[in-house]
Image (cartoon, grey):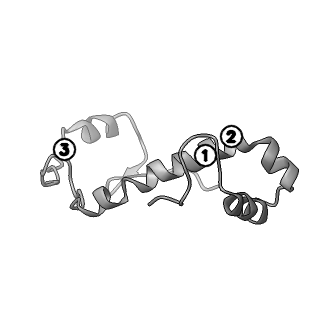
Amino acid sequence: MTRGRPLGKELPVEEVKRLVRETMLSEEEVVKNLDQLSRIMELFDEIDSFEEYAKSLEPLYHPLDQRGEPRVDESGGERARLEEFVKNVRDGFLRTPRL
């Protein structure tokens, strides 16, 4: 989408007026920073040029087309071994003093 202006450092007068309104800058500030503002507007045009391309793309649900299968949790028997060192275990829970 082009904004009706030539490429380069020139901005049409109507676009300068629009920038003054929309950026809350004074006209002097816009004129002073015209080169930078022109470059910013060119970058927006460059971004806009990808819009049609982006519309033609299908959504990417998973980059490798793999299913996320949950793994099976297996007990390695470490809990029972660790419980041997703890004196206050009841029904698989560690008992601690009340706070």
Eye-nearest disc, 1 or 3:
1
**What's the CA distance linking mark 1 and mark 3?**
59 Å
Percent position of residue 12, x then y: 66, 56
**What's the CA distance linking mark 3 and mark 2?**
63 Å
Residue carrying label 3 = 75
In the displayed structure, 41 sits above or below 14; it is above
The tag earlier along the polypeptide, 3 or 2, is 2
The tag earlier along the polypeptide, 1 or 3, is 1
Percent position of residue 53, x then y: 29, 56
Q: Nearer the viewer, residue 10 or 66?
A: 10
Dot 2, how many residues are within 10 Å of its Cα: few (below 14), some (14-19), or many (20+)?
few
Residue carrying label 2 = 36
At label 1, the amino acid type is Ile
- Which quarter of the image is occupied by the C terminus? bottom right
Percent position of residue 71, x then y: 15, 49
- Asked if the residues shown at circle 1 and circle 3 are in contact, with their CB atoms under 8 angstroms apart, the answer is no
Dot 3, how many residues are within 10 Å of its Cα: few (below 14), some (14-19), or many (20+)?
few
Q: Nearer the viewer, residue 58 or 64?
A: 58
At label 3, the amino acid type is Ser
In the displayed structure, 31 sits above or below 26; it is above
- Which quarter of the image is occupied by the N terminus? bottom left
In the displayed structure, 84 sits above or below 2; it is above
Eye-nearest disc, 3 or 2:
2
Residue carrying label 1 = 40
Left or right of 40 on screen, residue 23: right
Label 1 secondary element: helix
Dot 1, how many residues are within 10 Å of its Cα: few (below 14), some (14-19), or many (20+)?
few
Dot label at residue 94: none
